[in-house]
Amino acid sequence: MRMMKTALLAAAALALSVHAAAAASIQAAPSDIKISLFYHGAAVEVKGQAAPGEDVLVKVTPSEQHEFHLKYKGKAAGIFWMKLGTLVFENLPSTYLLASSGPVDKVLDAEARTAENAGLDALQKKAVIKAEKGAMPAGDWFGQFLDFKKKEKLYNVEEGTVKVGADGSYSYTLAWPFQAPPGSYKIEAVTAKNGKVTGHAETALTVELTGIVALLAKMSADNRTLYGIISIVVAVAAGFGVGMIFKKGGGSH
């Protein structure tokens, strides 16, 4: 009887140790980014806990995913460059920011990278690209989509920027791009060892318009005429202000 109890206690201890090893935590500050008149991005401090000896990936994507409809250009009659149609991109996030404690292909094996959507190759495997109408035109459309997103600063992969301590605590400074649209995002931490996933943690990040920026955005949607008038008034006032500055400086020569 005593041996059975000992065995049960040992099994319970083992189960608890496995659970503890798989546990991961994450927090982000700030968790709410306000887009004001002078907004130009933000620094988000991401911290958390993994088990000692584990690697960590931090991935940021929108909470909701939508398809993209992007127009493509080509030569009409083999002579003129013009918009020929629209391509539909599915299973691709509008924003994709990934950071890791080491090379992504070393932190996770190929199977885990695909399952976790970790890395641009994993994104490409799941991407669905098709023509909105007619036959699919030839071309490296995922590559062009990727170039477009990178130029917008909305797709980025950083290797080795997540710092992990000997006790498993980790930290990463996320340079939030001002180009990212308002909305709800999720910041995920994936812990791994020997290429295999050992744990997950997730927290939310909200990006929202505030103050006069929110007012103007609402006005542009609800009352385009008034928005246009105000835009003209602001432009004229700005021009008048510039004129006064030059006048104080002695005028033109």
Image (spheres, helix red, strand yellow):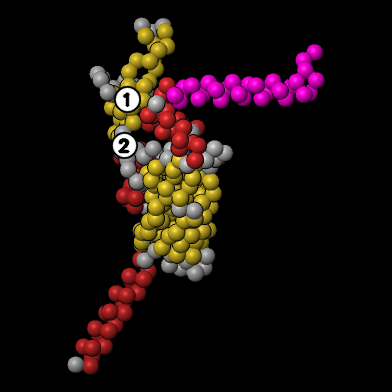
Q: Which residue is mark 2?
A: 66
Residue 251 lies within the magenta run: yes
Give the residue drawn at x 51%, y 51%.
Answer: 44
Report the amino acid beneath label 1. Answer: Leu
**With respect to residue 119, does 232 lie above or below?**
above
Please state, as top left, top right, bottom left or bottom right, where the N terminus lies in the image.
Answer: bottom left
**With respect to residue 121, does 107 lie above or below?**
below
Query: From mark 1 to mark 2, how far is it between C-alphas?
Result: 14 Å
Q: Main secondary structure of the magenta part?
A: helix
Residue 105 location in percent, x, y? 42, 50
**With respect to residue 85, does 91 lie above or below?**
below
Contact, CB < 8 Å: mark 1 with mark 2? no
Q: Which residue is mark 1?
A: 87
Give the residue drawn at x 51%, y 24%.
Answer: 231
Q: Mark 1, residues whose alpha carbon is within 10 Å: few (<14), some, or many (≥20)?
A: some
Q: Residue furthest left?
A: 1
User: Which element carries disc 1, helix, strand or loop?
Assistant: strand
Residue 210 lies within the magenta run: no
User: For the magenta stretch, what is the residue range?
Assistant: 226-253
Give the residue drawn at x 50%, y 25%.
Answer: 230
Residue 172 location in percent, x, y? 51, 55
The picture quadrant where one finds residue 17 is: bottom left
Which numbered circle lies on residue 71? none
Report the amino acid beneath label 2. Answer: His
Please state, as top left, top right, bottom left or bottom right, where the C terminus lies in the image.
Answer: top right
Q: Is residue 42 visible?
A: yes
